Amino acid sequence: MNVIETSKLSKFYGKERGIENLDMQVNEGEIFGFIGPNGAGKSTTIRTILSIVHPTSGSASIFGKDVTKYGPEIREEIGYLPSEIFYYENMKAIDLLRYSASFYKKPKNHMEHRIQTLAKLLELNLDKKIDDLSFGNRKKVGIIQGLLHEPKLIILDEPTGGLDPLIQQKFFNLIQQENKRGASVLFSSHILGEVQRLCDRVGIIKEGKMIKVEKISDLLEKSTKRFKLTTKGKADKAVLLNITGISELVYNGNDINFLFRGHLRDITKAIAKLDLVNLDVNEPDLEEIFLHYYR
Ligand SMILES: Nc1ncnc2c1ncn2[C@@H]1O[C@H](COP(=O)(O)OP(=O)(O)OP(=O)(O)O)[C@@H](O)[C@H]1O
Ligand SMILES: [Mg+2]
């Protein structure tokens, strides 16, 4: 079953395009990542499927139910972390979280235990006023608030912004654990490394439309390599022209950079003709594979 499904979903803010005819599916049990340039429509998609904003046209369903009709009911089973968090800043973190917990039907002591466990894991001091917390620590409050009721679906809008590397690591482990417990996850990110590490599939959104959806495993199997060469004198351009499998070839004085996908023997033969002083060969990360979508 698809946990999330949209059909020709559009949201315009007046004349301003938020998203347009966006189709997407998130399968039950998967972690789906969502990337795309600023203003592409990631947050709008999330807000529309959560029925925080009303779609201009098209439809979205979660757990098979139309989001505009069953919003409140659906939201009980969802954990949501917005990209920008606004809080009752005068409250202590623990009071805010207990207040949030009181909206769910689960037993109080169970919720209390969950809050304490998550706070310990993320190293958050619950006794501080929200106002006195740093940006990253406020983000942790948002994360706990999103996860405390053990939701079936977790939707995170740029979750790791502001978290230090150690906490990011713990956060990733937490999301993986939640996924193992059975939660499906949708999250938006600009950090392709985290998408690569966490997701089963990734969707690229551009100018309000979902332009591509790929399995991460497929992406990484396409064994493209990034070559960085430095030659002694000025690089001889002719050597690498007309070799199939080369893309994004850039000459810059003594440096040559390109991506290569094909038989290594073809490329090593060509490179052998150059007077090399350095050679660096890498698997490109998702960033390199995806950067052209951003252009
Ligand atoms: N409340 C609003 N009023 C008017 N226009 C809006 C509003 N919210 C979003 N937009 C517009 O909708 C488009 C999509 O914005 P959205 O916030 O969904 O992008 P995003 O992909 O989340 O970007 P970012 O990576 O910067 O978070 C943008 O052109 C934006 O200006
Ligand atoms: Mg956004």
Image (cartoon, helix red, strand yellow):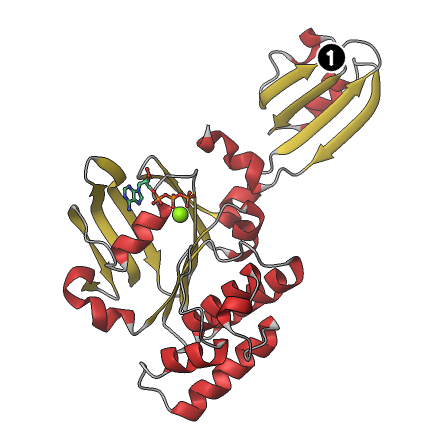
Position of residue 111 relative to residue 167, above or below, is below
Q: Give neighbour class at mark 1: few <14, some 14-19, many 20+ (Cα, 10 Å).
A: few
Which percent across, then down, holds residue 210? 33, 41
Position of residue 158 relative to residue 80, above or below, is above
Q: Is residue 176 visible?
A: no
Which percent across, then down, holds residue 169? 62, 62
Looking at the rendered structure, the kind of residue marked 1 is: Gly
Frontmost residue, 13 versus 276 = 13
Frontmost residue, 275 versus 15 = 15
Q: Is mark 1 within 8 Å of ligand 1?
A: no
Q: Is residue 234 visible?
A: yes
Which percent across, then down, holds residue 138? 51, 65
Residue at the image point whose x is 27% and y is 60% from the top: 50
Which percent across, then down, holds residue 251? 67, 15
Position of residue 263 relative to residue 28, above or below, is above
- What residue did someone put label 1 on? 253
Disc 1 is placed on an element classified as loop
Instruction: Give the quadrant of the N terminus.
Output: bottom left
Residue 164 sits in quarter = bottom right
Residue at the image point whose x is 16% and y is 46% from the top: 56
- Left or right of residue 14, residue 25 in this image: right
Q: Quadrant of ligand 1?
A: top left
Q: Please identify the residue farthest to the front as the structure is shown.
A: 90
- Left or right of residue 249, residue 146 in this image: left
Residue at the image point whose x is 37% and y is 91% from the top: 107
Residue at the image point whose x is 47% and y is 55% from the top: 200
